[in-house]
Structures are given as C-alpha cells and as structure tokens.
Amino acid sequence: MAEGAIKLGGKRKSIFMDKVKKLLPDGGNLNLCLTCGTCSAGCPATGLEDMDPRKFLRMAALGMDEELTSTPWVWMCTMCYRCVYACPMQIDIPALVYEARASWPRETRPKGIVGSCDMALRNQSGSAMGTPPDDFVFVVEDVLEEYRETQPDFKDMEAPIDKKGAHFFLNQNSREPVTEPDEMVPLWKILHVVGADWTYGSKGWAGENYCMFLADNDSWEKIVRTSINTAKELGCRVFLNTE
Amino acid sequence: MESIEGDAGNFQVTVRERPRYVDMDKCIACGICAERCPRKVKDEYNQGLAKRKAIYVQYAQAVPLKYVIDADHCIYFKKKGRCKACEKYCPSDAIDFTQKEKIHKIEVGSVILSTGFKSFDPRGYDVYGYGSLPNVITSMEFERILSASGPFQGHLQRPSDNEPPRKIAWLQCVGSRDLHTGCHEYCSGVCCMYAIKEAVIAREHAGGDLDTAIFFMDMRTHGKEFDRYYDRARDEAGVRFIRSRVHSIERAGPGSDDLQITYVDDGGELKEEIFNLVVLSTGLEISEEVRKLAQDLGIDLDLHGFAETSCFTPVVTSRPGVFVCGAFAGPKDIPQSVMEASAASSACAVLLADSRNSLTQEKTYPPEDPIIYEEPRIGVFVCHCGINIAGVVDVPAVRDYAETLPNVVYVADNLFSCSQDTQGLIRDAVKENRLNRVVVAACTPRTHEPLFQETIRDGGLNPYLFEFANIRDQDAWVHQKEPEKATEKAKDLVRMSVVKAALLEPIEPLLLGNRHKALVIGGGAAGMIAALDLADQGFKTFIVEQKEKLGGYAKYVRKTWKGEDGRAFLADLKERVRGHERIEVLLDTKISHVSGFVGNFTTTVTTGSAEQELEHGVIILAVGAKSLKPDEYLYGQSDLVMRWHELEKLFEKEPERLEQAEAVAFIQCVGSREPERPYCSKFCCTSSLQQAIDFKTRKPGLDVYVLYRDIRTYGQREELYRKARELGVIFIRYSLNEKPVVEETRINGKDKLKITVKDHILGIPLELQVDYLDLATAIIARGDEELAKMLKVPLNEDGFFLEAHMKLRPVDFATDGIFVCGMAHYPKPLEESIVQAKAAAARAASVLIKESVEVEPTVSVIDQEKCIGCGLCEACCPFGAIELIKVSGQGYRAENIQALCKGCGICAAACPQKAIDMKHFRDHQILAMIEAGGEGR
C-alpha cells in the first residue's frame, strides 16, 4: 500500500474504476459501497496480501489506480461471487478484479494461469492440459467398454462423441480423462438411467477456461466459440456446461 | 373497509364486519371458554412460538377485552356442529354460533388510514438461514420471548432446546438498505433503537451473565434521548457494538444448534464468533393487503408502497378528505406515529370544523337527592363475576356479613354487577331503599369504577358517594387455592369499604371558565402551522414572535428532501397567516409574564416599550432552536469554511464559484454527539446530502467528500444516501478521537483548504484539497430557562422542552393547557415540525372546544388555620398547583390552585402541620379504613 497520505481533490482525473463502470450494466453498482464488510466476511481470499474485497473496492473509489492494478491479490480471487451474492448493494467486485487482471501485461500474469491458457489454445480440444481430441476419444471409449463389460446393469450405457442431432451437448473438465478417468462415469450413468440423448464433441470438449481466469478476452472467446460451434454443427439443442 | 364513495366532507364508507361468534355485551372476558376449548392453534401474536385456542383474545391488553372464535380452526365450524365446549361452559351465555357477517354503511366526513406495517419476512434471505436454523429468529419473535405474557413467560430462552442463551447477536438492516429482490432500499428507521433496547432488556433478564453484540452499518439513534441510550447501552450495560455486516450464518458444527458468525473488523481482520442465538433486526414494509386497499380507495402510493405525501402536508393523501398516519406514511417509531395520529385528527377537525358538535348528544342526570346529606344509609352489592369471584369466595356469606355492618341498610348479590340489567337493579335499589352511599364488591376499580359512579348518579347520588371493594383482582384471583381465607379477606375488604363509605362526602364538580383563544409562542413554520390549524377551526389565535418577521429556521430550507420548494411554501404560509381573520401576529414582541392555568391564562407581552395583556385558554410553545457557531475546523477564521446552508447560498448567489471549484467537503456532527452535547441533531445528514447531490448534479466533475460518524438518513431519506454515492460522493468516516484536521493552504496561487483524515477502511491518512468546507453544526436550544420558569414546564438536560411522555404524550406537558412543537422540542426536519405543530393544535383544540374546563375535583384542601407558611408543599408540588400568598399580619399561607392540582397527595404527605387533606382520600377516611381492616384479626 502507498506510503504517506493519499492526496485527493484538485483537477479530476479519469480513474480506473470509472473506466470499469462504463463496461458494466448499471456500472456494476461500484459507486454504491457502504463499506459494511459483508464481501470481505464471505471472501476466501480475505487477508491474503493484506487485502480483501472491501479494501480493494475502497482503493478503486479513492482512485488508487497504481496499487489497484499492481496488487497480486487479484490473482487470488476465485471468481466465486460470494461477495456479490450477499452484498446489500449487489456490487460486482469480481468484474473490477477481472479488469484489474486485464490491466497486467500478459507476460507478467501468473505463469500457471498463462500456461494453462496457452495450452488450451494449442489444439481443438480447448484443454488446459493440452490433451488432443484423439486422446480424449480413446480414453472415453476405453473406459466405456470397461464399464459395459464389468457392470451388467450398464451394458447398454453410451458415451457418444460427435453424435449428430443429440439433444444435449456436454463438456468435460480435462482433469478427469487425463488423471481420474473413472470420475467421468457417474454422470454417464445418470444420463443413461434417465435416458438422456447426449453427446461429447471431439472438438471443444474441455470445459475449463483458464483464459477467462487470465482475463485474456480474445483467447477466452476463442475457446468458448470452439465449443459452441461444435455443439451447433452437431445440431444439439442444449449446451450443458458441467464446469 | 370495502370502499369509500363520495367526496371530502361527505363520504359513504362500506365496512365488512366479520362475525365474532361471541356476544360482546355478554362476554365478561373470564377466559373459561378458552380454557375449555380443545382446539390448539398457532398463536400469531406470539409469532408462532406458542399456542392459543380456537376461541381467544389476541393479547392480554386487547381493547375491547372480548373473546372471538377463529372459525378457520374451531371444531364446531370444521366438523359441522360438533364440540360447542365454549357454549357449554360460558357462564354468561355469550357464545352465539349464528352470527353472520355484517355490512355497515357509515356516513363520515373524513377518513384516517392508519393501517401500520408488516415485519419483513427474512425467509428468502437464505444466507442467514432463517427457517432452517432454529436459533435464528426475528426481532419480533425476540420481543415475544422477552415479554412476561410471551411464550416463555419472559424467561430468556432459545427455541431449539429452551436453554437460556449466553451469547446473543443482533444483525441490523435485514431486509432494509438492501437492493436484493424482495428487500427494501429504504432504512426502516426503528431497528437500531429496538435492537439496543432488546439487548439491554435481555441483559437485565439474564442477570448480567449474557454477552450481547449488535452488528450494524450505521447506528441510527437520531431521536430525542436516543444517543444517550446508545451511549449507556455501550458504556454501562456492556452491549457490544460491532460495525460490520455479517455475510452468512452457519451451524457451529454438525449436530450443534449454536451459530457461527464470521465478520471483518474495521481493519479488515477476519473474526469468528459462536452465538447461541441470533436475532435478525427485520425492517418494516407495507403488506400486499394494504397496497390493494390503497388501490381500491384511490390512494397513491410511492415506489415502496407507502402512502404518497408531501413534506408540507405529511398527513394528506392523494384523495381529498382521506388522511394518513403512522407507518403507512413511511417507516417511523412510536413517538412520531403518535404525533402523526394527532396531526391527522387536526387535519380532519379543520376539514369538518363547520359541522363540529352537530351530531353530539348530551347526557343528563337527575338532580342530586338531598338525602346525601343525611345519616349514612349504605347499600352493599357483592358480585359473583360469573365464577371468577364466586368460584373461590363464598359470595352469599360475604353478602350476609355485609348486612351485619353498621349503617348498611341494603345488601344484594349479582351474577354480573356490570351488566346492563344489574345497573338498573342498583339504580332502583338506591331509590327504593333511600340509599345515600353505595359499595360494590367486585372486579377492580381500574376498569369499572366510572361505570358504577355513573349508575349512582343516575340514581340521584353524587358520584363520590361510591366505594369499590376489590374482591376479584386482589382476592379471588390471587387466593384461588385458599377459598376460606379468600372469603374472610373479602369480608375484611367489604368492611373497610363500608367504614370509608360512611365517611364519604359529596364533591362538587370543578368547572372553570374557558377562554376559547390560543397563544402560539414563536412564528416559525411550526408556530404558523399550529396557529392556522387552530384558526381554521374557529379559534382566535395570537402568534408572538420576538424577531421582526415570521419564518424562523424554515427560511433556510431551499428544498425539502423530497425536492419540494421550501421558499414558496413559506411565502404561502406567511400569506395565509397574515390574511387570516382569526390570527393576530405580534412581531418584535416578548413574553414578560404568564399567569393562570388551563382555559384561563393571562400573558403579558411587550412590544418595544408597549405592554399588553393577552387572555387565552391554551399555550403552544414553538420557539424553535438555533445552530451552533463552532470554534473548530477554522470556522470564523477562514472564509472558505461555512456551515449549514451557507455554501449552497454562496453557490446560488455566485454560480461562478461552483464553476471554478474542484472539490468541496462536508463535516458532519460538528458539536453534536460530543460529551458536551450527547445528542444527534437529526437532519444534518439529510441536509448535507441534499447539498452534495445538488452540487454533484450541477457539476459532475466536482469532487465531494462527506466526513461523517454515522450516516443517519433514516427512513426513506436513505434514497439520498444512495443517490449521493451513485453520483460519486466519497464518504469518509471519522471517529471522535481522531477528528479531521483542517488547515489553510495555497495551491497554484489559489487559497484552498487541506483536510487530513484517516480513511476508515484503509487505515491510512487521506489529504483532501478542497475549495470549500461546509460544517453541519449542532442544533442547539435557544436557552429558554426563563420562559420555562414562567410557564412552569421543564427543559431536558440539553435545554429542549421536555414533554409529558415521550411516546404517549409527545406534545403535552404535565401542566394542562400547554403544548410544544417544532425544534423547541428537539432538532427535526421541516416535515416533522409540521406534523408536531398539527399535533399540538389538535391537542390544544381538545381543550378549546369545551364550554368550560372540567377538572377532576379530588384535589388537595389546605386548612390555612393550621398552615405555618413553611413553603414545603409549594416546593414539592410537581404541577405548580400550590402558591404562597401573603396574609396580612400572618406572613405566608399556602393556597391551592385547583385547576392545576392532580390530586397526587405529595403536599399532604409533606406538610409538617397536617394542614393539607386530599378530597375523597382524607386522612380520617383512610385511617378509619385501616382501623377497620385490623378489626377482623
């Protein structure tokens, strides 16, 4: 935090919060803060880096743009929206956090998140783990076969990929196919039991989107579009986001 | 109410009366029906924490105290004619299952809507777990838990396991100051005070071993004496006040009924606490039912469902002739609601002044029988009160015993002495047996003494020749398990009453003349409104104003908080006062002497060197208040530092000043809420925010800072606070021990101010460079000690006039005929001054309309032969009803002013010479009773 007194008043300059307000419906209510502390009481990142959502918003209100756009705390926000949920003024603090992230030069943003985003851009899967479409198809088919054989109740279970005209399009966090393949099965079973008509897509199947967490708008959009376009091409009616 | 047809002055109202299934004339509220009723129902009055029966009274103090059958639950109605237990056991045959719904058509000239509020239901507010966590309750539920007539008889215990809680938390602003769907943007205005009260009382009930914490955003204790209460709760009662809003309430652990609260302190540190009970301070709202009613009646509502009113006419709805008071006109507390109630009645009285007394009937009594001056001939009537008395006391035995007592010539016992036919029997017995004293041994004089006094008056006796023996409340009810002793006690009580009855003397009514004129002291908005309401009702009214013009503080109000033009209002008001044939305005005039009493005041006033006497029946004090000129924050030293409306006035006169300004600041609570002046000046937050919004709207690029301690935009004024924030006004909270520091500075060749203040969230110093600073300084009393002394009315510690009772008599004094309104009572915004002025007018009119002033004649009598003129009685009398007069050759002697005497007896107790006696309670009467009481042993 800044040393010495913060000087306010004098010629009014355009401040960071004003820019963010222009981007949000109703300005995200960013001006309405009562400094009541509800957000900070519910925030899992309160206290990290000597920061919490209330302080963060207060700094924005006071025009402390430099501190606002340089604190690493913004990368500790999980975007869980617990703050907004209970805030009596319904202030969109996560949106402010997001724009603060976006103000960081890409190369200075946290390596892990940058890496995961870049990985997802490498192929058509959109997977933060870099899993190519073929690998995903193989794992799904392999696991399905195993369950059909060992569990007679599910001998007819399906896990379709690129099934044209399916009602539901499902995405899938890539951690499961890569490290815990069995974890995909419970959802398949439910869909099987209720008789849902669904499909994965070989392209854009990965549900996680680190580019969003990275505040990299273009890449975020690219990954989302890949998924949506696949669903559209297959003629699916409903997109089930499992993330 | 189904509908209102017609116009102001001539309405036809249709009212639907639901059947009660109990004959109100017969029900004696003994409660046997409810005892016998087998059907238990959730008790709404106790917020569902207890059960009632299908036949019930809503609560113990209900008026009228008559039972009612809840047909939605009654077995008779549910199962076609079964049960009828109530009918079977009712001792007075009051149950009537055949009653039908009735439609009444009522002709009235005006209507007052006082439909009240509904408490916010926090069920939808999921983060607080109400409805799923048993020990999360609403403040209304907690009120019932604390009440002696509540579900736990006033024992402090929590719902889950009926264990006494050791830690209780209150969460403020639940449903209020909240933009969530279903919640309300406005402040409910009363929750801070009731939460403090609940915490203090809870600690009293728990005997001190209780931790209480109130979680709040802004502490809104803006009413009269409220801040003192807040200070005492914190400093003396040990209530913890935590400025933090709680995110969510969670179960303290698996299987636990305790509750975990996580919050951040001012510094942002995360804290966790476990509480046994959490009370949600739920706000006030208008129910759907009332909204619908308003729609049907054609009454405009505001965005939040409250009746739309103007600040200038706060009790007037959009429909002429229909008035409003209480929470339906906006969230408010009891004192304000009571004042509004009187104000609404004044509005009606003005509207209907022409038809006053056109529908009244006067009751006449037979002349008093000369027998009252003969030897005592006492009649004794002993009441069964159904089985209330007779179930315990042997009533015939008491009756027979009474017959043996000296001077008793007639005795009787009655099933219900209060019933209409028994009244006739008593009246006849008085005549036939030539009785000249009557004793009734029955329920309690508290409710029934006036009835029996009336009965014997009808029989030709003086009402003071009546004596009540309380053998129900003070005997049968408290000695239910000892019927024989109760019977003996009843005999004792009857004997004592008979002895006193023999010594009773007729007392003549005390009728005093009444001058049907009013004196209003103070010509501000409150004084003028009060004068107009009285003059419009036909009463000649004097306004005495010490300044050379009318207007008072209201002339500074450019706009009300609702945005209405204050100056136009004031100009119109002055014109109406000036042009009124029944108002006489005396400017530049001072009060120099006041004498007399209700109905008969004589006031000497001085205009310049001329003196004159005004004769009038009532006095309304509307002397206003003034604002403090502080000696801090460079006030008086720098031209850039102003107070109250000075800054907006400057910007109005010289708009280029606003054009050139880059930043302005307001400092709140200057001189208020300090040890020297521990009260809130109530409307400074609203006033400063109005200006801040105005500046910011005219010049969005202007930086505006408000340095505050608590923002107190109570009620719907909260809208201003939201608007100001929306416009980008920056609010910085300071504390009393770290006040802002203001210094002069020059920036770019321009004189500016530098204000240093610590940011309440970041904990770092902020340095504000501003062009102007406006101080919201304390509103202080005028220093009216002399006037108070002349009128014999008290001032509070802060120099404001002290009303008779904060809630029940908010514009009266203990001294009859004198009323208070406006800022003389306490700092308040214009709309509240107007309400109070109208209330004072209503109260004053209730005196002025009477032909003569009738005073309770049970006053003290002074035997001047015994009096030694010591003056002790004069000093003791709280009503100024005794004065010392000079008797030639004897020094001073005390004299009673009957019109002022309340018959309290303090003087009689104090008199060392026993020269003072109380009529109807004379020493020898009381002593005889006491002696007779001992005879039975």
Image: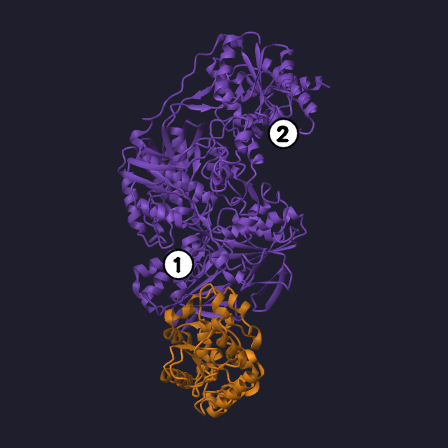
Look at 32% across and 44% down and name the residue there.
Answer: B297
Q: Are marks 1 and 2 in contact (CB under 8 Å)?
A: no
What is the CA distance from the residue labelled 1 to the residue labelled 2? 56 Å
Numbered disc 2: secondary structure = loop
What percent of the width, then of the height, locates residue B94?
49, 28
| Figure chain in orange | A
In the rendered structure, the answer to whether residue B27 lies left or right of residue B554 reads right
Task: Tell me where residue B892 appears, x and y as whole percent.
Answer: 56, 21
- Identify the mark nearer the N-term, 1 or 2: 2
Colour of chain B in the image: purple
Q: Is residue B779 above or below residue B464?
A: below
Give the image quarter of residue B321. top left
Q: Is residue B409 above or below residue B895?
A: above
For residue B477, which numbered disc appears in the image? 2
For badge 2, the amino acid type reads Trp
Percent across and percent down for residue B267 are 57, 68
Q: Give the position of the C terminus of chain B as an image quadrant.
A: top right
Tag 1: amino acid? Leu
- Report if residue B33 is visible in the image: yes
Does residue B622 appear in the picture of this structure?
A: no
Residue B858 tag number: none
Which mark, residue B720? 1
| Furthest residue in direction right, as rendered | B937
Between residues B910 and A33, which one lies in front from this camera angle? A33
Residue nearest the observer in this picture, A221 or B674: A221
B384 with respect to A94 (left or right): right
- Same chain for the residues under marks 1 and 2 in the image: yes
Q: Which chain's residue wears label 2?
A: B
- The crowd level at tag 2 (other Cα within 10 Å; few <14, some 14-19, many 20+) is some
| Quadrant showing the N terminus of chain B | top left
Residue B439 percent location from the top left of the image? 57, 17
